[in-house]
Structure formats: C-alpha cells, structure tokens
C-alpha cells in the first residue's frame, strides 16, 4: 500500500523542500521504497536540495502531455530505494494545471510502486496545492516558530478543511450552497467555529450533517515544526494547537520538531541532503524520529471527495479519454 505524504506550508521558505529531501533519505535508509515528487509548480527547486542535475523531464512534461505517465519520469538518486520526479524547472510556465490532468495525476501518484510518495508542494493555499494536500487525510504542514508562520499554518489548515467539506458534496448540490454561505460569513469575521457547519447542513438533511461530521473527524493533518531554537519555542506549538482546536474543531498532531542549524543552508548550497553530510547531528536524529513515526503510523483511508467540476468530468467521459 502506497502512503502519499504531501508536504505543505502556509508561508514560503519554511523548510518544506529541506524536510522532503531529508525525510526521503531517512525513509529510504529505513528500508522503504520512496518517491520524492517536486510539485512546487512554478518554483521547482527540490532537485537542488537533492543534488540532482536539472536536465531531466519532470512533472511539467506530464502536464503538457509530452510525457504520458508519472512513473516514466522516475529517476534513481544516489540513495538506494530513493527515487525522484523533477518538477517543472525545465518548462517554467506549466504551473497552470487543468483539473482533468490534476485528477489523473493524483491517481497515478497514489499508485506509484513505492511505500512512500512524498509530495513537496508549493507554499500557500491555492486550490491546486490544497487538492494535492487532500490526497490523504494526514498530510504534513511545515511551520517555523515565527508568529506569522503559525498564523499562516492556521490559515492553510482552515482553507484545507473548508475545501475538504466542500468537496465532500457533489457540484451544484444544496450542501455546497450552505457551505459557501457559511464560508462567506466566516470571512466577514463572525466567530462561528467549523463545528457549527454540520449543524447548518442538518437543514439540508441528517445524512449531509453526518457526512460532514465524519469527514471532519477523519481529517488528521500533522505539523512539523522547523527551525526551533529552544524548548521554550514549543509554546507557539501549543498556541497553534489551541486555535485549531477552538476554531476548527481539529486535534492537531505534531509529527516532530527540527532544530535551527546553520549547517542546513550550507547543505543546500552544497546540494546535498544534510543527513547524508552529517548523519550524527541532532537534525539527522530528529528527521529519523519523524521517519520512524511515519512508518509506525496507521494508514488512514484517504478522504472520498467529489471533483470541483464533476459535471464537466462526466461530459469529458463522453469525449476522448484524458
Ligand atoms: N532547520 C533549519 N535550520 C536552518 N536553516 C534552515 C532549516 N530548514 C530550512 N532552512 C533554510 O531555509 C531555506 C528554505 O528552505 P526550503 O527551501 O526547504 O523551504 P521551502 O518551504 O521549501 O521554500 P519554498 O516555499 O520557497 O519552496 C533553506 O535554503 C535553508 O537555508
Ligand atoms: Mg520548496
């Protein structure tokens, strides 16, 4: 069974690519087959962190249909069992991903022959990013100990949760209207918590409310805190957990914490994952701890979602297959 692990963040530059690369190495060394996919479309740079040359076809070629399967893009790396799929650095401008292609891509990624498929996502809450994040119920969100980073992580989780519930119901359904209305009110600053949403949906039907509640209960994103300088920093982690619990009704799990270490930027410059350079560092130890936790975690079933444009999708089946 392939575990898809999207790595997202609300704010850029918090360490998603550093985590993805080092975690990939750690999982591969622990005996797992791992595929690292650069899905930071428009900002692909995972190859640099990994020390791969930027000369191979990647996701950009798949999006523009110059390559027909993701699996055909797999590259070996210097680490046994660790494979890499480049992004669109060779074909900039392919960041716009048509939804048929995205759906097919998500299916292919989930079916890659590996134990773990790590998706290094772009930062922020664009729908493309969120939809890749929702490939699984328990994606990773990276955040640092700055208050703005914590707030951005919170916004990211809120947007992801909103989209999860929205896509739990078919296009043009009564439920989506209720959810949209709830979202608009929330944007206006009302203090309603997400827990009120199932109650609203009860006006449509009891089953709709139950479905929303089930989807909320099964959503279990995990946070990795990066660039910690002292254990006092963890207070901010508790704050994030508090607002997520209060406003989103989610119990946030922490997958781990990584220390701030100047050697990391040196590793990036030297184009070598830090845990290969310094296997005995605190950083390497903590990455291994995260890997261990991920290996031991129960595999949750992915959320069952409707597509944004289910009606168009149905029509597309009446034309050539995509
Ligand atoms: N634990 C750490 N200690 C010190 N510096 C770090 C640490 N993690 C990341 N960095 C620094 O932060 C920089 C940004 O990291 P990275 O590229 O992984 O972020 P990102 O979230 O992928 O960014 P983007 O959103 O641009 O894709 C790295 O080049 C490195 O210099
Ligand atoms: Mg990155």
Image: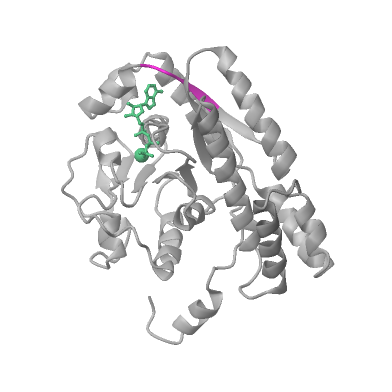
Q: Quadrant of the C terminus?
A: bottom left
Q: Residue at x 27, y 35 (%)?
A: 50
Q: Residue at x 42, y 30 (%)?
A: 30
Q: Which x, y percent locates residue 320?
A: 37, 84
Q: Nearer the viewer, residue 52 or 245?
A: 245
- Please tell me whether residue 310 is drawn above or below residue 253 in the rendered image: below
Q: Residue at x 72, y 66 (%)?
A: 178
Does residue 295 appear left or right of residue 118 in this picture? right
Q: Nearer the viewer, residue 95 or 56?
A: 95
Q: How many marks?
A: 0
Q: Which x, y percent locates residue 133?
A: 51, 50
Q: Which residues are magenta?
A: 256-261
Q: Is residue 92 magenta?
A: no
For residue 176, say whether it is visible.
Answer: yes
Q: Quadrant of residue 157?
A: top right
Does residue 171 appear left or right of residue 185 in this picture? left
Q: Nearer the viewer, residue 274 or 295?
A: 274
Does residue 273 appear left or right of residue 108 in this picture? left
Q: Quadrant of residue 304?
A: bottom right
Majority secondary structure of the magenta segment? strand
Q: Is residue 260 magenta?
A: yes
The quarter of the image that holds ligand 1 is top left
For residue 299, say whether it is visible.
Answer: no
Tell me which colouring the rendered structure shows. one colour
Q: Quadrant of residue 83?
A: top left
Q: Residue at x 21, y 55 (%)?
A: 57
Does residue 279 appear left or right of residue 230 in this picture? left
């Amino acid at each position: 069974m392939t575990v898809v692990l999207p790595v997202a963040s609300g704010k850029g530059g918090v360490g998603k690519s550093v985590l993805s690369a080092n975690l990939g190495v750690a999982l591969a060394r622990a005996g797992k087959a791992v595929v690292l996919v650069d899905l930071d479309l428009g900002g692909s740079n995972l190859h640099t962190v990994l020390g791969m040359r930027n000369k191979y076809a990647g996701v950009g070629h798949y999006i523009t249909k110059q390559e027909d399967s993701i699996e055909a893009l797999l590259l070996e790396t210097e680490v046994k069992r660790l494979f890499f799929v480049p992004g669109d650095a060779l074909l900039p401008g392919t960041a716009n991903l048509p939804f048929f292609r995205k759906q097919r891509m998500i299916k292919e990624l989930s079916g890659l022959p590996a134990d773990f498929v790590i998706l290094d996502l772009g930062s922020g809450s664009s729908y493309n990013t969120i939809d890749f994040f929702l490939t699984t119920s328990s994606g990773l969100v990276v955040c640092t100990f700055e208050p703005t980073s914590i707030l951005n992580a919170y916004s990211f989780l809120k947007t992801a949760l909103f989209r999860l519930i929205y896509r739990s119901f078919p296009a043009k359904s009564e439920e989506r209207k209720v959810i949209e209305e709830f979202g608009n009110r929330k944007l206006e600053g009302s203090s309603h918590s997400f827990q009120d949403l199932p109650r609203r949906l009860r006006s449509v039907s009891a089953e709709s409310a139950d479905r929303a509640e089930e989807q909320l209960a099964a959503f279990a994103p995990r946070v990795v805190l990066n660039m910690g300088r002292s254990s006092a920093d963890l207070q901010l982690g508790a704050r994030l957990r508090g607002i997520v619990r209060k406003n989103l009704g989610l119990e946030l799990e922490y997958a781990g914490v990584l220390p701030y270490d100047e050697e990391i930027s040196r590793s990036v410059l030297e184009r070598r994952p830090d845990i290969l350079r310094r296997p005995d560092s605190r950083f390497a130890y903590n990455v291994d701890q995260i890997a261990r936790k991920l290996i031991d975690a129960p595999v949750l079933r992915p959320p069952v979602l409707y597509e944004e444009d289910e009606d168009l999708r149905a029509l597309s089946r009446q034309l050539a297959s995509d």
